[in-house]
Amino acid sequence: MALPEPLDLLACADPVHGFRAAQAEGRLIALRSSGTTDSPRVVVRTTASWADSFDAVSELCAMSADARTWIPGPVSASMNAFARVHADAVGAEVVDDPGVATHAVLTPLLLARALDHGLLAPGVSAVVAGDAMPAGLVRRALEAGLDLHHYYGASELSFVAWASGDRPLRPFPGVECRVVDGVIWARSPYLSEGYGPLNDATGAPPGPYRRDEDGFGTVLDRGELVDGRLLVHGRGEAWVTTAGVTVDLAEVERVLRTDANGAVVVVGIPDDRLGAIVVAVLDDSDDLPRARAHASSVLQPSHRPRRWYVLPDLPLTLAGKPDRQALAEQVLAGGLAPVGR
């Protein structure tokens, strides 16, 4: 007997009710990965691969039935769909007003904007995912009195590592991590089944998800495992060649974020003379002197951004992350003026 098609969770009028129905019927669920804006991949997983992590998440961020959770990002991002399903399972209320929230689920950029506008009260438990956490942003959140948590994961892997406060990332409960040739692999009950048949309809390119014979999965993110701490360096495929030198943009971005309070986005721009150049876009002008000084002292000359821009309102993807493609197009079109030389 043929298995039923995975339930497309985001095609449901209410993804929470869709998840409940899939759980009751023993069906797989299909979600869109937020890795690209124009051709998202379809990730298929069991309902148990989410539900099995609910207790651990609830314990780590102290969520119970009396919680009021603010989830401002779109449900089309899997992290937000998960947060809504998790809140429902716990019996917590999802609220539209951050002023009454006890919990919030955010990307780093949305956290920075919430802090800028004083939207979250001291004591709110903020769970942040979707990108690297700049050290300056961690300090701001803690100084604002937030109970800060952030995690590393992916639509294909779910939770991989978790950190609270200013402590380093460590494997999430139930997850085994290993790093092979600089690539992060994880084995857990939370891994997805892979990419689904709906992927053909989206026109999405082949995805990065891999599984090995030992049951470990990866999305090819690079990192290190040091004394139980997971250091995430980003996707190794984001690189450009400038003046004959290959530059890993994720590595440059990681270095520049070391002491930043806001977002730092590094992109490659085509250049007639050098093939490509590295440019950096920040959303906080106060970060500019520190980032430039850090680039000069840490990065090789070939890896230092040749142009710097400040854009307070960075364009966002539907998942609430900086839209790198839109930024690169803005720079190419002359829509941004470089700051200094």
Image (tube, rainbow, N blue to C red):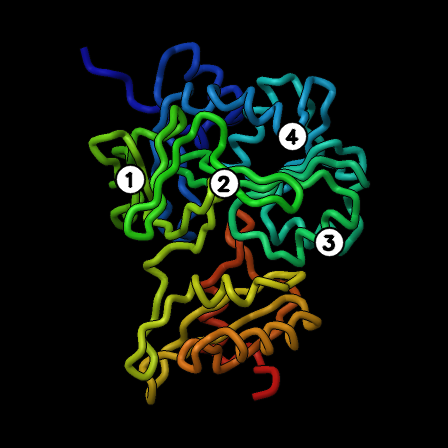
The quadrant where residue 105 appears: top right
Q: Which of disc 4 and disc 2 is earlier in sequence?
A: 4
The CA span between labels 1 and 3 is: 40 Å
Q: In the rendered structure, which amino acid carries the disc numbered 2?
A: Ala
Q: Height in image: 121 above or below 299?
A: above
Task: Label 1: state its secondary structure.
Answer: helix
Q: Height in image: 330 above or below 11?
A: below
Residue at image mark 1: 199
The CA span between labels 4 and 1 is: 34 Å
Q: Which mark is residue 140?
A: 3
Place of residue 19 in the rendered image (x, y in percent of width and height, measured from the top left): 47, 21
Q: At x 37% / y 22%, what residue is drawn? A: 46
Residue nearest the viewer, comparing 167 with 147: 167
Q: At x 25% / y 47%, what residue is drawn? A: 206
Residue at image mark 2: 77
Q: Which of disc 1 and disc 2 is earlier in sequence?
A: 2
